[in-house]
Image (cartoon, coloured by chain):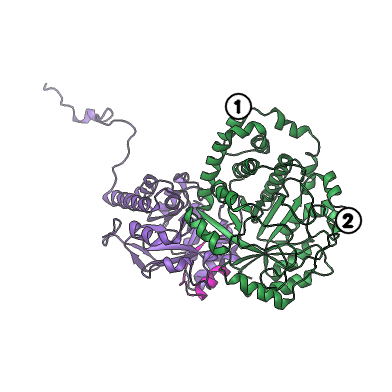
């Protein structure tokens, strides 16, 4: 059984049930041949793929041929600069048989690769109406996350740090608000560089993490995929087990109310 | 506002004095920084940075892998026409050169497209000389109508155009522009381009920005290293790229590092750009602009290109041919420049895989 498998605590997105809370990517690997081994080591059930990289004509050197049939495909709109382009790419992905899931990436900023919240919301509204299962990639903005939930998004994917930076949960405060407030699954996407950071996101109550760069750029990506799987499982277990509350000072005595229990002397 | 306004600040020698006064300590300080200013970039191009090339390379490698992964986008050039009205002293297509002039018919374009698509490549770069009466915008549009059937991504490297004409060609299916300023030294530029429309320095300088404004998805600039002091041209190329990235964040900006090669015209570069200089430029540029695309063409030798792989390159040409009709015609014309790396697409792909890099044949999908 994969390290992340947990039949009693499944991740549910778009009405589908998954026994892993680690989502993985297909970009940045030294070779696409590695993808099946990454999938096996990670136990992942959902994999994102950039439509821009999918070659519908090629018999070989096609990323799709490396993705086993049991995986839920999550085409992403990488390269879209606005809502219109994101919608077009999503429709194209569905038309060529990549299914009706889509991760919306609407990125008008090639320097920091930060998503455009307004464009993402517009694209979500359109694609939800067209029957897509929509997972928007967003900045860690609780207000936007709520608007996307109201628009019918099936999950929200706030970033932990700018994509590719491996800097961890730099948006932690806002992520916590999103996790606390949003009812649809919260998938922390982008910026997670270490298994311990993924574990922390899960301990905070995130429903899942998407990890690509940290796995793909590791010296041994397959081993790193296994490390992330275990970290995410540990973080989730800790969350469901109920973490003890954090105290800032020792609390052995009751200086303010202790008098209530003091024995009074007999007259 | 145009890059020219920014450029004029750097026309004198003053800003470049830093090149001579830079110290190793200053370079080390820059290597510890997260975000580099243009002054930092200049320091990394100085001779004081040369002892730190390995450190620069390590950092450039880490940043490239983080942002682009171990992937290399492959493309190949397709020369449509070599008619030219310019007399660029360094170019094989110079109108005074007695070479066979040709322009592909649409049937020939299709034959070349089929041959290239058969190699698996999905990124094509179309090139022409500067003869708008022959290779007109309308001709390019017609070529794109053919090429769109074979390639989801069409780049072009042709004469400078207006924003309106870039818009026309974007609608025809072109999604990326490559346009080299050749040299940013305006005086030298005038001397190297004695006749023809390319003489207009300012029009060419502003053309990449016109393409950004027209909505071009990707814009690739560069200078022909060796024409002028490479430190100055490399610096101004980076400054230009950074200017475009700041003002047009939705456009993917990239930089090519072409080095002068021998060609039919016989012009010899005035400045010797050594391999270590290319490494210095590439790694300095990567540290200055972590997400900029960097292209290395087959002007460079196979051996050198293999060594450059981990240092910041994101795009390489493969299976190149710089002659018009070179892939299918019985008699090919003389190329624009001589190719050093003559490896085929499968050979390049095999080399990349051996080195731990994934060859990417397709990195864009036309959605128009």
Q: Which residue is mark 2?
A: B195
- Image quadrant containing the N terminus of chain A: bottom left
Mark 1 nearby-residue class (10 Å; few <14, some 14–19, many ≥20): few
Please tell me whether residue B325 is drawn above or below residue A30 in the rendered image.
below
Q: Which numbered disc, 1 or 2, marks the residue that appears first in the sequence?
A: 1
Find chain A in the image and tell me its colour. Answer: purple
Q: CA distance from mark 1 to mark 2?
A: 46 Å
Can residue A77 be seen in this snapshot?
Answer: no
- Image quadrant containing the C terminus of chain A: top left
**Subunit of mark 1?**
B
In this rendering, would B355 be left or right of B81? left
Q: Give A231 or B200, whichever is nearer the viewer.
A: B200
User: In the rendering, at what x and y percent does residue A30 appear?
Assistant: 47, 55
* Picture quadrant of residue B86: bottom right
Q: Which mark is residue B350?
A: none
Q: Is residue A89 magenta?
A: yes
Looking at the colours in the rendered structure, which chain would you say is drawn in green?
Answer: B
Q: Secondary structure at mark 1?
A: helix
Where does the magenta region start and end? A87-107
User: In the rendering, at what x and y percent does residue B219 appear?
Assistant: 68, 56
Front disc: 1 or 2: 2
Q: Which residue is mark 1?
A: B25
Q: Residue furthest right?
A: B195
């Amino acid at each position: 059984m994969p390290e992340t498998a947990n039949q009693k605590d499944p991740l549910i997105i778009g009405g589908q049930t998954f026994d892993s809370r680690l989502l993985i990517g297909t970009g940045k690997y030294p070779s696409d041949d590695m993808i099946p081994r990454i999938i096996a080591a990670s136990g992942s059930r959902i994999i994102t793929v950039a439509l821009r990289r999918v070659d519908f004509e090629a018999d070989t050197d096609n990323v799709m041929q490396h993705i086993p049939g049991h995986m839920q495909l999550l085409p992403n709109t990488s390269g879209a600069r606005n809502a219109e382009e994101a919608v077009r790419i999503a429709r194209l992905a569905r038309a060529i048989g990549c299914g009706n899931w889509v991760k919306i990436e609407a990125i008008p900023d090639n320097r920091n690769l930060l998503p455009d919240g307004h464009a993402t919301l517009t694209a979500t509204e359109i694609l939800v109406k067209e029957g897509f299962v929509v997972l928007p990639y967003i900045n860690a903005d609780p207000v936007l996350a709520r608007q996307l939930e109201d628009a019918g998004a099936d999950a929200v994917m706030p970033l932990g740090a700018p994509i590719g930076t491996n800097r961890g949960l730099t948006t932690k405060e806002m992520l916590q608000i999103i996790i606390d407030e949003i009812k649809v699954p919260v998938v922390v996407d982008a910026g997670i560089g270490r298994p311990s950071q993924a574990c922390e996101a899960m301990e905070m109550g995130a429903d899942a993490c998407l990890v690509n760069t940290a796995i793909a750029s590791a010296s041994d990506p397959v081993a790193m995929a296994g490390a992330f799987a275990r970290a995410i499982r540990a973080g989730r277990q800790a969350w469901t087990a109920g973490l003890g509350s954090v105290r800032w000072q020792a609390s052995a005595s009751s200086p303010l109310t202790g008098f209530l229990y003091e024995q009074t002397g007999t007259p | 506002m145009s890059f020219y306004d920014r450029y004029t600040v750097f026309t004198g020698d003053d800003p470049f004095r830093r090149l001579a006064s830079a110290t190793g300590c200053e370079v080390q300080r820059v290597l510890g920084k997260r975000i580099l200013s243009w002054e930092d970039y200049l320091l990394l191009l100085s001779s004081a940075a040369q002892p730190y090339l390995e450190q620069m390379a390590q950092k450039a490698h880490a940043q490239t892998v983080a942002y682009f992964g171990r992937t290399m986008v492959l493309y190949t050039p397709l020369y449509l026409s070599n008619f030219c009205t310019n007399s660029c002293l360094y170019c094989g297509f110079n109108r005074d050169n007695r070479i066979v002039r040709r322009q592909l018919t649409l049937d020939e374009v299709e034959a070349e497209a089929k041959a290239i698509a058969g190699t698996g490549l999905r990124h094509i770069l179309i090139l022409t000389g500067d003869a708008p009466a022959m290779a007109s915008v309308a001709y390019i549009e017609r070529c794109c109508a053919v090429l769109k059937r074979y390639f989801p991504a069409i780049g072009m490297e042709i004469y400078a155009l207006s924003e309106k004409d870039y818009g026309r060609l974007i609608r025809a299916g072109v999604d990326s522009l490559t346009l080299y300023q050749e040299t940013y030294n305006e005086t030298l530029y005038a001397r190297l381009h004695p006749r023809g429309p390319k003489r207009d320095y300012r029009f060419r300088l502003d053309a990449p920005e016109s393409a950004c404004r027209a909505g071009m998805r990707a814009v690739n600039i560069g200078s022909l290293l060796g024409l002028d002091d490479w430190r100055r041209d490399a610096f101004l190329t980076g400054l230009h790229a950074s200017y475009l990235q700041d003002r047009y964040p939705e456009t993917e900006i990239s930089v090519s590092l072409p080095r002068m090669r021998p060609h039919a015209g016989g012009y010899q570069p005035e400045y010797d750009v050594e391999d270590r200089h290319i490494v210095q430029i590439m790694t300095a540029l990567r540290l200055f602009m972590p997400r900029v695309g960097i292209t290395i063409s087959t002007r460079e030798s196979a051996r050198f290109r293999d060594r450059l792989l981990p240092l910041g390159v994101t795009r390489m040409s493969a299976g190149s041919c710089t002659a018009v009709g070179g892939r299918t015609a019985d008699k090919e014309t003389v190329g624009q420049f001589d190719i050093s790396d003559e490896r085929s697409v499968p050979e390049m792909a095999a080399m990349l895989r051996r080195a731990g890099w994934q060859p990417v044949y397709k990195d864009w999908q036309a959605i128009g």
